Amino acid sequence: MKTFYVTTPIYYVNGKPSIGHAYTAIAADILARYHRSLGEEVAFQSGTDENSQKNVEAARAAGREDDVQGYLDEMADLWKRTFDALQLTHTRFIRTTESNHLAAVEMFWKAVEAKGDIYQGSYEGLYCQGCEAFVTEADLVNGNCPLHQKPPIVLKEKNYFFRLTAYREALLEHILTHPRFVLPESRRNEIVSYIRNFMTDVSISRETMKWGIPVPSDPAQRIYVWFDALINYITGAGYGTDQAAFEKWWPAQVQLVGKDILKFHCALWPAMLLSVGLPLPESVFAHGFFTVDGQKMSKSLGNVVDPVEMVERYGHDALRYFLMREIPFGGDGDFSEARLQQRYDGDLGNELGNLAHRVLTMAEKYVGGVVPERADGFLGEAWPAYRRAMEECRLHDALEAAWSLVRQANQYVDQRQPWTLAKNAETKALADTLYVLLETLRHLAHMLHPFLPGFGEGLFQRLGLGTSDQLALSPPFAEAWGGLEPGTQTSKGEPLFPKREES
């Protein structure tokens, strides 16, 4: 069986999950559900980054300085509960304080050391505490980190360094010969410029930190949080603990990240893998940022959006749809609850939900809910466009391909007017029209199931097809016209996107 391994970044647990964290995790969940629908065996990993100084500071602020691990346990549990509340289908929730990860990091460090790619040196430079990374003057805007709006500190330490520059040419060659390695293309150009012109060796330990994984040969130093955190992707695949599992799952097919951590994932991480002789992930996809009603999301502005609250107000499907439809995946966008409500009422309620309910209601009224004999429909290029978009992580374009069918089906209803055909006793034309519409709904259920799992499941059941677990979802069945068997009993049920009560 073909395998598919998708990862999200691991998240700092110095605060509650926000809509920004949910955005990446939901995108990964959509890819995971899609590849399961192809009959592939899927591993979907997310988790928490717990060896960061940020987490220690958060524990101190919470009065838990003497119980940092206890604080991390509580916060990691909160993140797990949030992901469960979002109905994510991750197969692994990794924590970087777990014993498997500690063992993997120690094994990895020793392998890099044995290769001769670790050396000692002193470093003095500008360090952004928010990014937990050294920066240069060129990275700053008016003396501040552009992400955290604070000036960096001057840090001087005796550290261990990784020979990142030894892999400059190998990285450039890999990106050139593997165009899908960095997606979208705009990010590829950015990372090539960084590797070619700005990349330097990187400090991978801290002598002043007291929290984190000790350097195996020098316990007085702690491993730099990024060097440790990046290894989580292979820890979860079995590196250092289950060789058979590791060979099965690695390399990952897609690693989703935010554009702010592109350099770590497309320069440092692949160089680390090259150092120990492991294959590189097939694709690293960097999505953009979004504002909230035109403003940067921040605690100080009080505009941090809780994804669970949005689900409670609008439902899982509506939040998933809005995030993937409103914001082109890979670019920047804006989150607006007013726009979410408009998308719910318009796209989901009036276009999609109303189409499904009208067709199923007419089928019940005119043919007793029994699927008529097959008739030719109008799929056109919807499936090829959808498949291409999904394979290239253009999730917004995949939705547009599905929505082209939604619009065509609504136009078809208006053109054919089944109620007029019934009134005029045009039995054959009515039966053909209803089959085309019911079969189009089946195709929409397949296409939209990864994005709108509640809608997909509800529509499968109303079409008399059972649940997605009972269906052959993969091609060619999903794409072939005529998969809805004549004689199947359908039911209209309740509207899948009912009108919302005004709050």
Image (cartoon, rainbow, N blue to C red):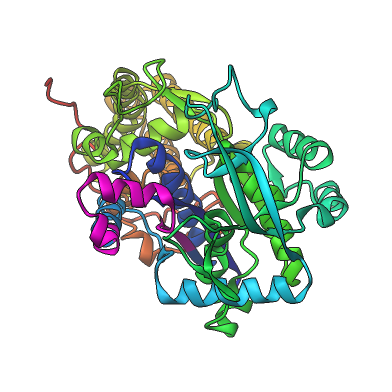
Q: Quadrant of the N terminus?
A: bottom right
Pinpoint residue 88: horizontal percent, then vertical percent.
Answer: 35, 54
- Side (left or right) of 325 relative to 55: right
Residue shown at the point (19%, 33%) measured from the top left: 313
The one nearer the camera, 435 or 380, is 380
- Side (left or right) of 101 relative to 240: left
Magenta-span inclusion, residue 61: yes
> Would residue 384 be seen by someone viewing this image from the given angle?
no
The one nearer the camera, 385 or 74, is 74
Q: Quadrant of residue 73?
A: bottom left
Residue shown at the point (67%, 52%) measured from the top left: 283
Residue shown at the point (70%, 45%) measured from the top left: 182
Pinpoint residue 401: horizontal percent, then vertical percent.
Answer: 55, 34
Look at the image and give the residue range highlighted in magenta: 44-72
Residue shown at the point (30%, 53%) measured from the top left: 79
The one nearer the camera, 9 or 432, is 9
379 w.r.t. 346: above or below: below
Magenta-span inclusion, residue 467: no
The one nearer the camera, 172 or 403, is 172
Pinpoint residue 299: horizontal percent, then vertical percent.
Answer: 30, 28
152 w.r.t. 450: above or below: above
Pinpoint residue 494: horizontal percent, then vertical percent.
Answer: 18, 40
Q: Quadrant of the C terminus?
A: top left
